[in-house]
Amino acid sequence: MRFSPKAFHFSLCQARRQIHLTFSLLAFFLLITSGVRAAEDLSQPVPALKPTLNQAIASVNVVQLLKNNSYEKLSLDQSNSEKIFNSYFDTLDRNRSFFLASDIKEFTKYQNNLDDALKGGNLRPAFEIFNRYRERSEERIRYMLKLINAGLDELDFKKDETLELDREKADWLKDTKEQQDLWRRQLKDSVLSMKLNDKKISEISELLTKRFNNQLRRLHQTRSEDAFQLYLNSYTQLYDPHTQYFSPQRAENFDINMSLSLEGIGAVLQSEDEYTKVISIVPAGPADKAGQLKPGDKIIGVAQGNDGKIEDVVGMRLDEVVKLIRGAKGTLVRLEIIPSSASDGKTRIYPISRDKVKLEEQSAQKNILEVGKGDKKARIGVIDIPAFYIDFKAAQAGDPNYKSTTRDVRKLINELKKEKIDGLVIDLRNNGGGSLQEANQLTGLFIPKGPTVLVKDSRGRTEAQQDPDPKEVYDGPMVVLINRLSASASEIFAGAMQDYQRALIIGGQSFGKGTVQTIQPLNHGQLKLTVAKFYRVSGQSTQNRGVIPDISYPSLFDPKDIGESSLPNALPYTEIKPTQYAALKPLAPVIPELTKEHAKRIADNPDFIYLNKLREYQKQFDGRTVVQLNEKKRKQEITSMREERLAIENSLRKAKGEKPYKNLEELEKEQTDKYSQNKKDKKPEEDALLVETGEILGDWIRTKNPMVAKNNQ
């Protein structure tokens, strides 16, 4: 959906007038920091930052845009002033490792009037708080360097100490003594992690010295724009997590994450604390083909080529990390990763060959999967759709062969019908969405006519998208396979198939992204704001809750970490009045029997047993928030975890008659070798979840047509 920028216009004259009437800030705003800097003298304290007049105008502009046009309606009043206050401190110091309780007490004078400050463009409170944060950051860095210079051998790894990793709800640090004790433990944890990753103390000392000196340099290089963007987003994200202010530098490419997804490794990244975290993997991109990098992984080092030295990127700005990762097509980048699925503290090195994501490589693909045995055999067509794509440029140019999801799937279905399939699986796992138009048109391939999705805008108006083609391309038995990474357009399609009773939905609960955003230019940067919400034809929202499968599979994705519901201030699941649509015969009566047969099959299925064990393993260890700082105990914990992980792997191999691994290193080497092969070479028979989906569909087909096998002979 597109919305006219004119509908959201708030003139600069109005913004200037409101600032002038509310505050006499001319002298204040003329104190603008220079855009040209001399080389930083790191021995000097970090200089204070000051806001600019353009930033003040932009803040007023953003307030008005959100007030008039955001889907979520919030009053910028005293109650929300307190939320902005808390949100800003959470943004700056989520783990409560910098600010003292005395800092918070001092700044509570702003707690109830940030609403008025924003309305009038007064950024003084925000910059006072940010400058204090920089002071505390500098103190931490210099304290860490002092400890390193004193010698890391002085750290006592025999002492029984622990470190609380998740301090989000902890009390603010009461004094300098408590603050420095926390910093010492954090340093001790970093050193111990490196020691257990086979680094020598001299190497660790050199690496950490370089890391903290780099952080100090970046602290000196922090710009006024950094403070402004963080503060404004502490306000905008009270509306929802997708409402964001982009500074002019970020607005230039729209979003640095998106520019990375187009060229480089094909991953969307964001900063989280001191780490660069993987948010999603672009289908058919280099990282997806390599197969190792996963959402939730943290990048701690980047190296160029096969032999380049790994550069530590902990604490580095996101744009700087991106520059290191991006590069010429065909060149190799190696990433040092803390995997989201690893609980043993061991880092991994993932080599990825840089490339551009090609539209043709994101195309839907087909396969044939045979399930059942003897007279129960069925031929299942499988169409894997990695994204909802369309080549707009070619379509607008009148190219009769332009590529789109719907056109490709139509062609593949016709080919599969000639191959006499008995049923069809649409595989939407890891499909993060794309074109709404394509989700609408793809739905139309499987229903005679009717609405496909409802879109409710910020003014409360609801519009139904309609099936543009009354012809059904396929009317046979069908399953849609989803997981937690199936989002947006994927959820629209899956939700429509479920509401029309057109297909069984199998897999994991989907992501829950059911909102529409638009980008609006400002005098200074851009604002992305949520302007509409998707609803299924049944009136249910896809927002927050996602699509719930008819038959569920165990998932290794933790909803607390992955999915819309894991994001702060995510819009809630809601329902509206359903629209008129002609659903087919209800599938509810067949689901219990299909579920029963599924449960029998997986009871002794090695792959499902393995998946359940792995999920329990992750629950056991990933939820830990306290780590041991006693080296002996830490080693014992890691050994225990790795032995348990190895046992899970070898139980699967034993069940399949394969030789057990001697250790996890052997497993990881084999996985790396496998991942170096193109994922498209993987046969559908090797995908346990896909095979079981085919079996469920086979059961359903036989309940509808017991003569399936004879028809195929």
Image (spheres, helix red, strand yellow):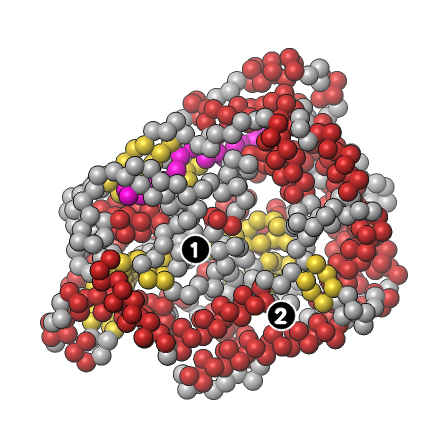
Location of residue 397 (image quadrant): top left
Towards the viewer: 666 or 411: 666
The residue lying at 62 percent from left, 63 percent from top is 624
Q: Is residue 433 visible?
A: no
The residue lying at 42 percent from left, 65 percent from top is 554
Q: In x, y percent, where is residue 352?
A: 53, 62
Towards the viewer: 561 or 305: 561
Is 677 left or right of 16, judged from the image as shown?
left
The residue lying at 45 percent from left, 71 percent from top is 612
- Residue type for callout 1: Leu
Q: In x, y percent, where is residue 148?
A: 83, 60
Magenta portion: prevailing SS class: strand
- Against 64, residue 495 (above or below) is below
Q: In x, y percent, where is residue 5?
A: 44, 26
- Residue type for callout 2: Asp
Q: CA distance from mark 2 to mark 1?
A: 25 Å
For mark 2, give the secondary structure: loop
| Residue at image mark 1 | 485
Magenta stretch, residue numbers: 520-538
Res 344 label = 2
The residue lying at 83 percent from left, 68 percent from top is 156
